[in-house]
Amino acid sequence: MAGRSQPAPQLPPGTQVVLREAMLDSDGVRVQRGATGRVTAAHDGEYRVALSDGRQVSSRRGALTLRRAHQQQLAIGPTADGGHDLVARHTIYAAVIGSRAYGLSHEGSDTDVRGVYAAPTATFWSLTKPPPHVDGPGPDQFSWEVERFCELALKANPNLLELLHSPVVLTITPLGEELLALRSAFMSQLVYQTYSGYVLSQFKKLETDLRRHGQPKWKHAMHLLRLLLAAGGLLRHGRLTVDVGGHRDRLLAVRRGEVSWAEVETWRLALHAELDAALEATPLPAVPDVARVDAWLRSVRARSARVALTAP
C-alpha cells in the first residue's frame, strides 16, 4: 500500500555499498562517511563490509546504501515524487480491475485502479528517465508507462489483458482509445501458457496451505478458477470477458469456503481440460502482432517529440 514504509532489502555477500555515516573499523580507527566496500557477511541485522582500502567494518543496514544508487543520486539527483506527477498529467487510460470488474464484489471490496501513462518523449532525453511503473498516488492505484505496458501485454500478462477489457473505465483520452483499438494485436495463443501456468503454480501453493493449515486461501482459489474461466472463453472466442456472469454464485461459494477442496479441484481439472480443447480450435494467432503495437508506440513517441520541438 502506498504510504507505508518498507524495510530495506537484505544485502547478499558481494554487494557494493557506501557508508552513509562515519564509523570505526575493526581496529578502532575512524572511517569517513562515503567510503566504499563490499558486503562479506551478514548476521542478525549486522553486515560485515570489506572496504576498498582493505579495512573491515561492521554496520547496520540503515548506515549502508547501494553504491549504484548513491552514485545515481549524487550525479543526477533523486527521481521527483515517484512519478505521481506523470500519472496525474499523462494518464491515457485507467480502469477498475479486481472484484468490482469481475462481478464478484461485496460490501467492503476495494476499488483497485490500474492505468497506463505515456511519458512525454522529451523526458527520455534526460539523464533521469521516467519510471516504467508508478505505485500510487492512491492507495489502490498502480500505473505502467505505455512502453512497459506494451511489453508485458504482448507476453499475455493476464493483469494487463484484463485491464484492457475492464467494463469500468475511469479515464480515456484519444491515445487511450487508440490503445484499446489495439486490443486484438496483444492477443495470441500465449494466453494458454500464461493463464494455465500461473494457475497451476498457485494451486500447488494452495495445496501446501491445505496440508499445513487444514484449509487453503479460499479467496485466492476463487480467483484462480475465475482466471481459468476467462482463459477458456478467450481461447474459444478470441475475446476476453472479464465479468464472470453466471458463474458468480458458485465462485462466491468457493470464496466463502462452502465448496469442498475436492470439488474445487475437480472443477479446476475440468477447466484445464476445456482449456486444452479450446487451444486446438482457437481463432487466436500463434503470436501477437508485435509489429502493429511497435508501430503505434513509435507513433506515440514521434507525436510527443514534435510537440516538444515546436513548443515555445
Image (cartoon, rainbow, N blue to C red):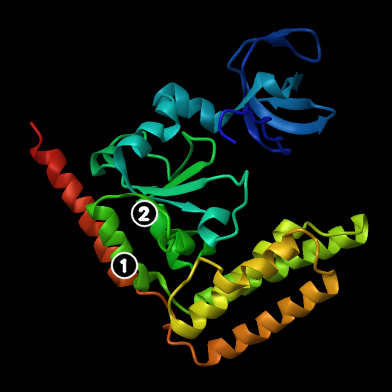
Q: Secondary structure at mark 1?
A: loop
Quadrant location, the C terminus: top left
User: Which amino acid type is shown beneath numbered disc 2?
Assistant: Glu
Q: Secondary structure at mark 2?
A: helix
Q: Quadrant of residue 8?
A: top right
Mark 1 vs mark 2: which is more N-terminal? 2
Question: Is 216 positioned to the left or the right of 128 in the image?
Answer: right
- Of labels 1 and 2, the one closer to you: 1
Identify which residue is drawn at 87% across, 61% down: 210
Q: Position of residue 78 (x, y in %)?
A: 44, 25
Question: Is 155 positioned to the left or the right of 305 in the image?
Answer: right
Q: Are marks 1 and 2 in contact (CB under 8 Å)?
A: no
Q: Is residue 250 visible?
A: yes
User: Which amino acid type is shown beneath numbered disc 1?
Assistant: Leu
Question: Is 293 positioned to the left or the right of 139 in the image?
Answer: left
Q: Which residue is mark 1?
A: 182
- Relative to residue 232, is residue 65 depicted above or below? above
Name the residue nearer the viewer: 101 or 90.
Answer: 101
- Relative to residue 198, is residue 7 depicted above or below? above
Identify which residue is drawn at 48% across, 44% down: 142
Q: Which residue is mark 2?
A: 147
Q: Quadrant of residue 147?
A: bottom left
Q: Is residue 198 visible?
A: no
Name the residue nearer the viewer: 38 or 21.
Answer: 21
User: Disc number at residue 201?
Assistant: none
Identify which residue is drawn at 44% across, 60% down: 166
Local crowd size for mark 1, using a 10 Å CA cut-off: few (<14), some (14–19), many (≥20): some
Local crowd size for mark 2, using a 10 Å CA cut-off: few (<14), some (14–19), many (≥20): many
Quadrant location, the N terminus: top right
